[in-house]
C-alpha cells in the first residue's frame, strides 16, 4: 500500500484504484505511514518545520500543527530537533507529522515502541478518535494491550499465514500467547480494565436487584 515493495500476488486498491502503479504523491494524499523506526521520517531541524513541510506539500490542507502537537503531548517541543527527542517522543512526533495532513488511511508499524502505559492509553484514545472521524487505521503490533483496547478487528499472522481473523474478544480471549494481562487474570472474555469494571458494575446491579426482591418479599 505504501509502495516500498511490489506485490508478489493479489491486488491492493486505494479508493477503488490499483495502488501498485500509483504515483507516490497521489498515494501520499490518502495514506499516512509511520514506520517502526520513526526517526527515518525526520529531516528538518525542528519539529515545527517537519509539520510545516507536510502541510506545504499537501496544499496547506490539514490539521492545525499547534493543536496536533498539544493532542499528542508535544506542546513545547516545536523548536526541538526531532532526532533529539526520546524514543516515545519520536514516535509521537512522527505521528504528528503524518496526522497533520489528515490522511484517510493510517498505517502504523509497532506504534507504542518506547511508550509508557500512560502514553499508550493516550495513543489509543487518539486512534479511536481518528476512527470516529472516518480514518481507517491499520497497525502491525505485538502490543496486545493496545489491540484489546483499540482494535475492532484482529488478524493474527504466523509464518506468513493468517492464523486467526475476528474481533479482539474472539481472537485474544483465552490465548496462551496473545491474551491481554487482564484476560490472563480474569478470563471469561475480559480484555481490558474497563471490561472488568463494567462486569463488576453489572454484578452489583444484579445483586442489588436480587436483594431488593427479597426485601419486598419479606415486607421491607
Image: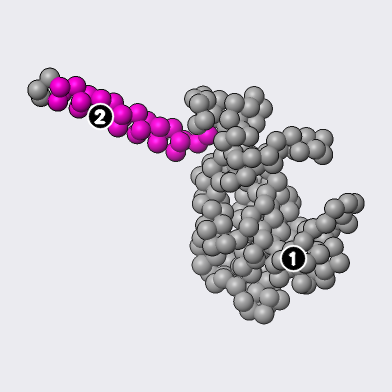
Per the image, is 55 magenta? no
Q: Work out whether residue 115 can be spotted.
A: no
In this picture, residue 178 sits left or right of residue 122: right
| Earlier residue among tags 1 and 2 | 1
Q: Is residue 194 above or below residue 86?
A: above
Secondary structure at badge 1 equals loop
Q: Which residues are magenta?
A: 191-217
Q: Quadrant of residue 197?
A: top left
Q: Which residue extends farthest left?
A: 219
Q: Is residue 141 above or below residue 133?
A: above
Question: Which residue is denoted by mark 2 in the rendering?
Answer: 209
Q: Tell me the quarter of the image containing the N terminus.
A: bottom right
Q: Residue at x 30, y 32 (%)?
A: 205
User: Which of 76/125 is in front?
Assistant: 125
**Horizontal and vertical percent position of residue 219:** 9, 22
Q: CA distance from mark 1 to mark 2?
A: 53 Å
Q: Which mark is residue 16?
A: 1
Q: Work out whether residue 157 can be spotted.
A: yes
Q: Which mark is residue 44?
A: none
Q: Is residue 83 above or below residue 189?
A: below
**Horizontal and vertical percent position of residue 34:** 70, 56
User: Which of 198/84 is in front?
Assistant: 198
**Horizontal and vertical percent position of residue 123:** 56, 51
Secondary structure at badge 2 equals helix
Using a 10 Å C-alpha cutoff, classify the residue at mark 2 as few (fewer than 14 neighbours), some (14 to 19) or many (20 or more). few
Q: Quadrant of residue 22?
A: bottom right
Q: Is residue 29 above or below residue 190?
A: below
Q: Which residue extends farthest top?
A: 218
Amino acid at each position: 500500500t505504501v509502495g516500498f515493495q511490489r506485490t508478489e500476488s493479489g491486488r491492493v486498491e486505494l479508493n477503488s484504484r490499483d495502488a501498485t502503479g500509483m504515483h507516490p504523491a497521489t498515494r501520499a494524499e490518502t495514506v499516512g505511514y509511520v514506520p517502526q523506526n520513526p526517526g527515518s521520517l525526520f529531516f528538518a531541524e525542528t519539529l515545527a518545520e517537519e509539520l510545516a513541510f507536510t502541510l506545504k506539500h499537501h496544499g496547506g490542507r490539514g490539521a492545525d500543527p499547534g493543536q496536533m502537537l498539544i493532542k499528542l503531548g508535544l506542546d513545547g517541543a516545536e523548536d526541538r530537533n526531532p532526532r533529539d527527542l526520546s524514543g516515545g517522543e519520536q514516535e509521537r512526533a512522527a505521528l504528528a507529522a503524518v496526522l497533520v495532513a489528515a490522511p484517510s488511511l493510517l498505517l502504523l508499524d509497532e506504534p507504542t515502541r518506547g511508550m509508557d502505559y500512560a502514553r499508550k492509553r493516550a495513543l489509543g484514545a487518539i486512534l479511536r478518535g481518528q476512527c470516529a472521524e472516518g480514518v481507517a487505521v491499520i497497525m502491525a503490533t505485538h502490543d496486545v494491550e493496545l489491540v484489546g483496547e483499540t482494535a475492532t478487528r484482529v488478524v493474527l499472522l504466523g509464518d506468513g499465514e493468517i492464523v486467526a481473523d475476528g474481533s479482539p474478544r474472539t481472537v485474544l480471549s483465552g490465548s496462551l500467547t496473545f491474551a491481554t494481562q487482564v484476560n490472563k487474570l480474569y478470563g471469561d472474555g475480559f480484555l481490558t480494565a474497563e471490561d472488568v469494571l463494567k462486569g463488576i458494575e453489572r454484578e452489583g446491579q444484579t445483586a442489588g436487584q436480587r436483594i431488593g426482591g427479597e426485601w419486598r418479599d419479606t415486607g421491607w
